[in-house]
Amino acid sequence: MNHRIGSIMHLRERQTRSLHRRPALLLLVASLSLVVAPLQAQSVPARKLMASLERVYGRGLGADSLSLDGAVVLRVRRHDSVLGFAQVRDVMGKDQPITYLVATDTALVLRDIDILIYREPYGGEVAYEAWRKQFRGRDARDSLVVGRQIRGISGATISVHAVTLGVRQALRQLAEWRRDGRL
Amino acid sequence: MSTRPIIALTTLAVLTAPALAAQAPEAPTERTSIGGYGEVHYTNRSGLRSPGEVNVKRFVVFLSHTFSDRLAFRSELELEDTKLEGGEDGGEVALEQAYLDYRLGDAATLRTGLVLTPVGIINEVHEPPTFNGVARPQFDREVIPTTWREIGVGLVGNLSASRGLAYRIYLVSGLRADGFGGGTGLRSGRQGGKEASFANPSLTGRLEWARPGLKLAGSFWYGGSANQDTLIGTGSFDAPVLLLAADARYDTGPLAFRGVVVRTTIGDAAGINQAYGSDVGSRIQGGYFEGGLDLVRLLQPASGQRLLAFIRHERYDLHAAVPAGTSRNAAYARRVTTLGLSYKPLWNVVFKADYALFRNRAGAGEDEALALGVGYQF
């Protein structure tokens, strides 16, 4: 299965390289996508989510998708051993939703968060690794207060508070499902 | 069991897209958002035995509309001093920002309309809970003419998520030299998008580097100001103004620091002064530094509230250099020291109190002011 992912990536690299040799074609594709782009809704590309999960848990992943109270939780595993749980969620920023990922271990301790889609022109600093890594090792018992456990970023105040609140809610929700024996 | 494994597939590549489609954040459809900020001030410049003045300094409504995932309109409409009446001083209704954003990707959003000049700290980020002191720093009135906005087009974006760089770059309508003044600097030369002349297209931009708690930035403005007045020049870049700024913000939690420095050169200040009978300096420069200590953090570490005791020192000279034929005015070399408290029960609400000392090298018209204020943003 690793082999299959590997060969797909290899293929993709080759295609990218051949595009570089044809700048005119690349330009055409770029301008076409620019024209077409606004017509398409922006959802999380599978590739982006996969890359994000692989960054957290490593390669060779599998996952089961669990439906809990209408939400989808991914049970991430490698072969038969469960590595943790992941969830894609939305939280409102200043005027756009921020789509983010929470990824925990089996004890529901955060391994990492990721910003999958950020849509606003300001506050994009919440996607920076240096900011996100403050969440690693946190769980539902942490109060996660901006300015205490989580350092803010000047000029990104609204997004910093929104994502922190979103992560807090996600951890508490996961803990609740665990308490009810559903996770 | 309510836990229902729906599917178990071997690779995520196949699985995640359909599995998440069910839950997915709905693609943002058309939507209108409202926000705002405002501040009410009490200011007493005449001593406690005489009455002070109260004012609803600003009431600003933020209105945005999302047309699609990539196109959004954003605006801020500002009312200053509660009302505008004919024949009376003060009062202003003004569009502070109004632009269309076309999101091309994380790296670039194409922005068109009335935009804030991305110079220094306060011009772009001035919601009252974000800065200390009841009034904005005087530096951000006289050296950086806040709120500075012009009409134009440009790009904003993040250069790289991991390296933490963000930028903005705009081509906008220029300044007008006929409004420059010795004691007011560039302030009255701004056009603010009001039937503005595009005779002097100007470039302005900013590069920021962020870490948790830290933000460092450099910014600039470059453009002519002659506005085709034959007295000083008809070229697009005649009477050029070059402003270079650097700013830093550092917030460790218990301690918070910020500082800005600016150097502005006004080309052909001699010609401007001759043409309009003004006394503009050929160089304006200075800066300020502010340090704050969170007292709540010391007394009650678990609390999410903040009580910042701060001190700010501003030092700048509107006549750092003067052209031949203009004499240097020592009263334009100003120093302002402000001591105060900012109490924030929540991150977006603030109660403020401060005491400011206004000084200048000539020792003329010096005074002190006590100010109280409340502010909010949402």
Image: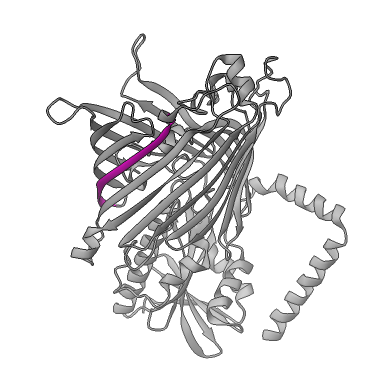
Query: Which residue is the extreme one toward the bottom?
Result: A80
Name the colour scheme: one colour
Instruction: Name which residue lies at 34% across and 54% down.
Output: B291
Q: Is residue B207 above or below residue A54?
A: above
* Residue B337 sits inside the magenta stretch: yes
Residue B363 in which image quadrant: top left
* Residue B240 sits inside the magenta stretch: no
Residue B358 in which image quadrant: top left
Residue B265 in which image quadrant: top right
Can residue B335 be spotted in the picture? yes
Q: Which residues are magenta?
A: B332-346
Question: For the C terminus of chain A, which image quadrant?
Answer: bottom left
Q: Position of residue B206 (x, y in %)?
A: 58, 47
Instruction: Name which residue lies at 44% across and 43% down.
Output: B125
Q: Position of residue B159 (x, y in %)?
A: 62, 57
Question: For the N terminus of chain A, which image quadrant?
Answer: bottom right
Drawn side of residue A121 relative to residue B212, left or right: right
